[in-house]
Amino acid sequence: MTKTDTRGTGLSALLWILGGVGWLTGEAVTAAAYPRYSYATNYISDLGVPEVGSFQGRAIDSPLHAVMNTTFIGHGILFGLAGVLVAFLVRSASRRVRAAVGVLAALHFVGIMLVGLFHGSEASVESGAIVLHVSGAAVAILSGNVLAIVAGAGSSALRAPRAYRVVSLVLGIVGIVSLVMLLVDSSSSVVNVFPDGVWERASVYTIVAWELMTGVTLAVSSLRGRG
């Protein structure tokens, strides 16, 4: 691994770890202040809605909505920067893999920014901004999970262990399947395997788990490169 690779992986590791820890912390703090919030039935984005009321049959009341929206935006920035750094600085990976990582990280950044700026609420439905919210969520979830698959497939350039490759592929596939099941369950009165919140979290937490695992893996790789 070159010195450029070492610098790139070290900084990317820090950004991805901060992004993952920040997401879990921000979500937990916001959810704790939300009366009767359910991780099974409420959507994650319910935590960022500034209005009090109901939406799609779910009670909306998030006193710390600003914390969650800051978490969305902060995560997008950290995740995007980490991916772009890998794309530009880790020369040991193929150009195709680096380009894919950079583009997917940038898409995740754009998608999660839209989630943080435009909310899933009745007000957004009335203004038409709900399209930006839903589209942003879909792009963020899909790009994040596809990135896990791409990173797993191209992980040999970072000398990552075989377990990293396997877990990355599994996480990405599980995340995409969960997103599909969320769409199926939420749009059908016949299919109802799990509550929507379960499917949504399964599709999002795979991304958070992957970025934390990747951050640790890159940190170890960077330390070995300096040795």
Image: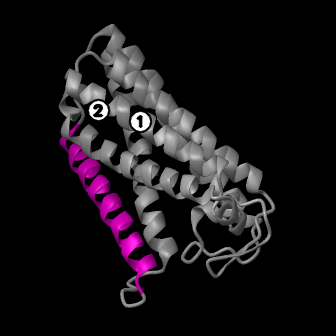
**What residue is shown at x 28% (from left), y 48% (from top)?**
168
Q: Circle 1 — which element? A: helix
Q: Which mark is residue 105?
A: 1
**What residue is shown at x 51% (from left), y 39% (from top)?**
110
Q: What residue occupies the far front of the structure in this picture?
A: 127
Q: Is residue 163 shown above or below 37? A: above
Q: Which amino acid is tagged 2?
A: Ala
Q: How many marks?
A: 2
Q: Circle 2 — which element? A: helix
Residue 123 position, x and y percent, is 72, 64
Corner quadrant of residue 56: bottom right
Q: Quadrant of the N terminus?
A: top left
Cα distance in 3D space between marks 1 and 2:
8 Å
Q: Which amino acid is tagged 1?
A: Ala
* Range covered by the magenta-colored residues: 161-188
Corner quadrant of residue 214: top left
Q: On the rendered structure, is 8 left or right of 93?
A: right
**Residue named by callout 2:** 100
Residue 41 position, x and y percent, is 56, 77
Residue 111 position, x and y percent, is 50, 45
